[in-house]
Image (tube, grey):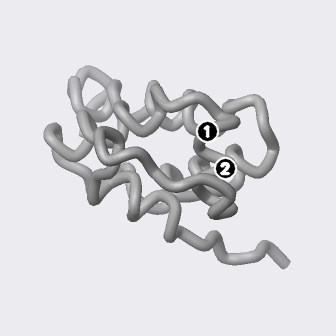
Amino acid sequence: MTSRDPLETRRKRLLWRATRRGIKEMDIIVGGFAEARLSTLEAAELDAFERVLDIPDQDLLSYATRQSDIPPDLRSDMLDAVLAFRPVPRS
């Protein structure tokens, strides 16, 4: 892909957002998911991932740690996939 590919440009922007969340745990979970999966996501899936990125860090953290239930209006396959993601530890 060239740097002018709109999907590639969008993926790079989303990766930046995903890895600079503000809470280290969310950088690891959301950023790790993005690093592992963004290259395979199509436009509609990128839309869904962007909606996940719009959720405030504190809320995402409470969903990831199961301190709070995910509200029905936020529940999605993409959010479930992000929260289920476990990054491979770096050696």
Question: Tag on residue 62?
Answer: 2
For badge 1, the amino acid type reads Asp
Q: Is residue 50 left or right of residue 53?
A: left
Question: Residue visible at 69% across and 36% down?
Answer: 58
For badge 2, the amino acid type reads Ser
Q: Secondary structure at mark 1?
A: helix
Q: Is residue 34 left or right of residue 51?
A: right
Q: Secondary structure at mark 2?
A: helix
- Tell me the quarter of the picture where residue 10 sits: top left
Pick the front one: 63 or 20: 63
Q: Is residue 60 left or right of residue 42?
A: right
Provide residue 56's location: percent of width, then percent of height: 59, 29
The number of numbered discs placed on residues in the rendered structure image is 2
Provide residue 39's location: percent of width, then percent of height: 34, 52
Assess disc 2: are there few (<14), some (14-19) or many (≥20) residues with their C-alpha within 10 Å of its C-alpha: few
Question: Residue visible at 65% across and 34% down?
Answer: 57
The vertical placement of 54 against 45, above or below, is above
Q: Quadrant of the N terminus?
A: top left
Q: Quadrant of the C terminus?
A: bottom right
Question: Tag on residue 27?
Answer: none
Question: Residue visible at 68% across and 48% down?
Answer: 61
Provide residue 53's location: percent of width, then percent of height: 47, 33
Pick the front one: 74 or 18: 74
Q: CA distance from mark 2 to mark 1?
A: 5 Å
Provide residue 22's location: percent of width, then percent of height: 76, 29
Question: Residue visible at 66% across and 50% down?
Answer: 62
Q: Could you tell me if the residues under marks 2 and 1 are in contact, i.e. CB atoms within 8 Å?
A: yes
Q: Is residue 23 left or right of residue 81?
A: right
Assess disc 1: are there few (<14), some (14-19) or many (≥20) residues with their C-alpha within 10 Å of its C-alpha: some
- Give the residue pinned by disc 1: 59
The vertical placement of 66 against 78, above or below, is below
